[in-house]
């Protein structure tokens, strides 16, 4: 039987599969919801009781565009269920996805305790054949470790698959439903066939499912993220150099990006990359290198440069205020590590907050989605307001940390009226320098010449 799903126009092909997703964070919830959307029966497992209760009651614990429509529909259709019990969650599942955290351990390498802990328990509770799929980002060799860990206790057959996830927060639903590619690392023909069938509805436009060995699949994810982090960092260095020699990074970017070998994307300079993935994945790949005596020199530089880049505007701000930020009040637009998410993990804004407060400045911030998360980690170190203009009242300068679309065309008359002085430090290059010149702002951005009043 074939049905049409209304908003994404998917053909739902039965028979559906029974799936468990262990870990219901950004990746797990999107994975579970999108597989439910293609007609599968999904149980999401999480140890966080409050989160599970919330989701059972129809509330999404994260902000992710488009997720609510799919979540509601599949919850109501009974295809999406939640539990805190691993045993209950995986009982009927043929495929078990592990979408667990792999945060940096004390030495910076990926902490596999969540993944291996669940693998240990799975071995004890599985009662029939399962495909155990690692969706978390994990170092090369993890599939083997998961296999050994499950095998210690398992009395039934199982296969391990490495299926790294490439979704971007903010576009996660679209990325999941229409992936550029799906990477499946497995040495088992049986598991490959099951995974191919599961992903068929997502690759109907001709995007590929790439089959490979587990190790290559694991490394593909780290290599892709590290390459993107390197691309951003390279542009940040070019931008810093532009400022010194009097070039404009926008022109350089357009000139470079029109070369199809380079491509237009990921060439925008700014105050560094953040998020839950790039910083930890670059670091974990360097650590993986160390473990086999390979020195990832390029990635070490990337990490070092990005660290500096996050607070690169602080000396500029200090310089503008004649050497001291003491007593200065800064309006901050944007806290999330990037737009369209409430995720603040490793966000440059947090580094700016610490650096500015340490210099004696005070901050009033606004972000459309991330303020609650920042309140949890920074408390009353800064003030929060309900819209971007309220942040400007009595501020000595505006600082932009995240490129939310809503900030791109602001009411400059209002900004001029509310700020004590017309001063903007823009960590995301939202405005044209000519425009700012005409409007009479002092405007410092990244890789472009300072506009003075
Ligand atoms: N966030 C992204 O954009 C993204 C993209 C691609 C890959 N990844 C990778 O996917 C993995 C998950 O990332 P995330 O951002 O979804 O993490 P997250 O922190 O948002 O979610 C992890 C979830 O796992 C739950 N959990 C922890 N221990 C558990 C256990 N024993 N049993 C059940 N649930 C448990 C937590 O409560 C949490 O809800 C990581 O390896 C990450 O690197 C993330």
Image: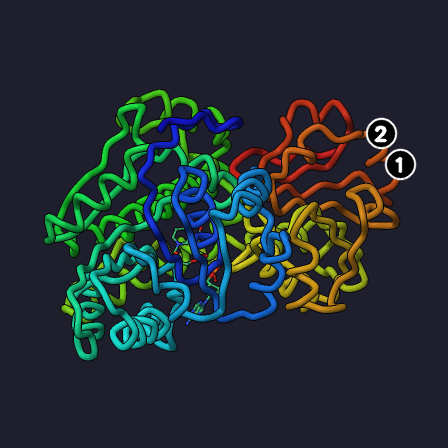
Identify the residue position indicated by label 2 in the image. Answer: 413
Q: Which label is found at residue 9?
A: none
Q: Position of residue 306 (x, y in %)?
A: 44, 54
Q: How is the image coloured?
A: rainbow
Question: Which residue sits at x=29%, y=46%?
Answer: 224
Identify the residue position indicated by label 1 in the image. Answer: 417
Crowding around mark 2 (Cα neighbors within 10 Å: few <14, some 14 to 19, many 20+) is few
**Count of picture labels:** 2
**Foreground residue, 261 or 386?**
386
Q: Is residue 37 above or below residue 435?
A: below
Q: Position of residue 250 (x, y in %)?
A: 49, 28
Quarter of the image with the N terminus in it: top left
**Foreground residue, 194 or 300?**
194
Query: Does the beta carbon of the residue at mark 1 sit less than 8 Å from ligand 1?
Result: no
Horizontal side of 145 relative to 383 (left or right) equals left
**Foreground residue, 222 or 101?**
101
Quarter of the image with the C terminus in it: top right
Asked which quadrant contains residue 156, the reply is: bottom left
**Foreground residue, 337 or 145?**
145
Crowding around mark 1 (Cα neighbors within 10 Å: few <14, some 14 to 19, many 20+) is few
Question: Which residue sits at x=71%, y=50%?
Answer: 332
Q: Is residue 44 above or below residue 166?
A: below
Q: Is residue 401 above or below residue 282?
A: above
Verify CB contact (< 8 Å) between mark 2 and mark 1.
Answer: yes
Q: Is residue 346 above or below residue 447?
A: below
Q: CA distance from mark 2 to mark 1?
A: 6 Å
Camera sees residue 244: no
Asked which quadrant contains residue 151, the reply is: bottom left
Question: Which residue sits at x=76%, y=47%?
Answer: 397
Q: Secondary structure at mark 1?
A: helix
Quarter holding ligand 1: bottom left
Q: Position of residue 32 (x, y in %)?
A: 43, 50
């Amino acid at each position: 039987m074939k049905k049409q799903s209304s908003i994404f126009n998917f053909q739902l092909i039965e028979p559906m599969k029974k799936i468990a997703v262990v870990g219901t964070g950004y990746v797990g919830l999107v994975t579970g919801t999108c597989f439910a959307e293609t007609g599968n029966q999904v149980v999401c497992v999480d140890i966080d009781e409050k989160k599970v209760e919330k989701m059972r009651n129809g509330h999404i614990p994260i902000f992710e565009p488009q997720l609510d429509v799919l979540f509601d529909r599949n919850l109501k259709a009974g295809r999406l269920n939640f539990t805190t019990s691993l045993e209950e969650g995986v009982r009927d599942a043929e495929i078990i996805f592990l979408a667990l955290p792999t945060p940096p351990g004390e030495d910076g390498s990926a902490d596999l305790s969540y993944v291996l802990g669940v693998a240990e328990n799975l071995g004890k509770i599985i009662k029939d054949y399962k495909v155990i799929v690692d969706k978390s980002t994990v170092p090369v060799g993890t599939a083997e470790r998961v296999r050994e860990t499950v095998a210690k206790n398992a009395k039934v057959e199982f296969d391990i698959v490495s299926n790294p996830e490439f979704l971007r927060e903010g576009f996660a639903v679209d990325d999941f439903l229409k992936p550029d590619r799906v990477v499946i690392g497995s040495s088992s023909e049986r598991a490959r066939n099951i995974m191919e069938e599961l992903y068929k509805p997502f690759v109907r436009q001709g995007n590929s499912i790439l089959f490979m060995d587990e190790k290559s699949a694991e490394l593909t994810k780290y290599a892709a993220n590290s390459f993107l982090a390197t691309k951003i960092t390279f542009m940040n260095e070019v931008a810093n150099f532009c400022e010194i020699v009097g070039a404009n990074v926008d022109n350089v970017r357009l000139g470079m990006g029109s070369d199809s070998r380079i491509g237009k994307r990921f060439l925008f300079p700014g105050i560094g990359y953040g998020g839950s993935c790039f910083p930890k994945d670059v670091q974990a790949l360097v650590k993986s290198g160390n473990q086999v005596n390979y020195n990832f020199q390029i990635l070490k530089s990337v990490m070092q440069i990005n660290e500096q880049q996050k607070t690169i505007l602080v000396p500029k701000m200090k310089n503008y205020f004649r050497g001291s930020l003491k007593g200065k009040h800064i309006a901050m637009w944007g806290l999330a590590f990037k737009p369209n998410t409430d995720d603040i993990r490793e966000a440059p804004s947090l580094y700016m907050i610490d650096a500015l407060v340490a210099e004696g400045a005070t901050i009033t911030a606004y972000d459309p989605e991330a303020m609650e998360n920042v309140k949890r980690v920074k408390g009353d170190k800064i003030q929060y307001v309900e819209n971007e203009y309220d942040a400007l009242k009595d501020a000595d300068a505006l600082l932009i940390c995240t490129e939310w679309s809503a900030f791109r065309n602001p009411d400059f008359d209002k900004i001029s009226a509310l700020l004590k002085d017309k001063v903007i430090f823009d960590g995301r290059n939202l405005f044209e320098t000519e425009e700012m010149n005409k409007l009479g702002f002092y405007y410092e951005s990244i890789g472009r010449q300072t506009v003075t009043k």
